[in-house]
Amino acid sequence: MEYVLLFFLLLVILVALYGVFRILKWSLSTKLRRVFSLLAISLIVLVMLINTLFFQQMEFIPSKVYPNLFLIKYPVKDTIALRLAIKNKILKEFKDPFVSNNDAFKFRSTKINKNTIDYTLRFYKYTSAWGFNNGTKHFIVNKEDPGGFSSEMLSNYDEFQLAYFNVVNCKIDSLKYRGELIFFEKGSEVGKDIIINLCPK
């Protein structure tokens, strides 16, 4: 089955390349066509540039099946600005894990062990379908599916993980806590920040 899909994908790529070759050959055959082709390409580039600069605003998209998962669409390229936006989003979404609140995340009040509260927020870059994957947008309305050829797990997209927030109990006072924010780039941890700290000194 895999070989059939790979063959079909290769066939589609070859047909597409042949189509591009034919279009290029046709558009470069006369001077008038070359001028119109150059104008069309310039217009497309200009529209894409305007769209990127003025209309693609960074957006946090919450998952409908995982209340602790946010996908970031059009993340800003400035690392400092992106991290600040994530911090602000966490502080806006955060609910005290020791206070009962119907609007809070359902999973947040359970302790994993004596030093950790089960309260996490995960941030991934929003990606669309490519190759044999559905992209991270799959997890907006779908749960992870570990089985079969078409398995979809969030761990398949570790290179798109941007940040992970976790609440940890204080060692001295287990009713107090601190919030640790870990940043990632290309699947590797690149920094940690304590953004909430109620632990006694």
Image (cartoon, rainbow, N blue to C red):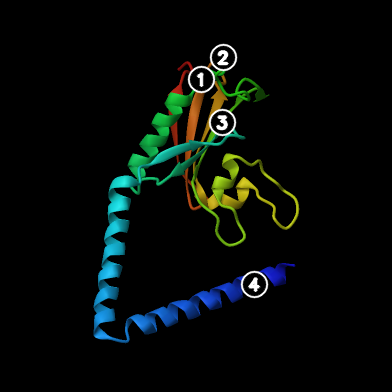
Report helix, strand or loop for mark 4.
Answer: helix
Report helix, strand or loop for mark 1.
Answer: loop
Of the residues under marks 3 and 1, which one precedes in the sequence?
Answer: 1
Q: Amino acid at mark 2?
A: Asn
Residue 55 visible from this viewpoint? yes
Residue 44 in the image: state x and y as whole percent.
31, 63
- Residue at 61% x, 46% y: name it: 154
Tell me if mark 3 has few (under 14), some (14-19) or many (20+) residues whose alpha carbon lies within 10 angstroms of its own. many
**C-alpha separation, residue under disc 3 versus residue under disc 1:** 11 Å
Residue hosting label 3? 120
**C-alpha separation, residue under disc 1 versus residue under disc 2:** 8 Å
Residue 112 in the image: state x and y as whole percent.
67, 26
- Residue at 43% x, 81% y: name it: 21
Residue hosting label 2? 101
Residue 113 visible from this viewpoint? no
Q: Are marks 4 and 3 in contact (CB under 8 Å)?
A: no
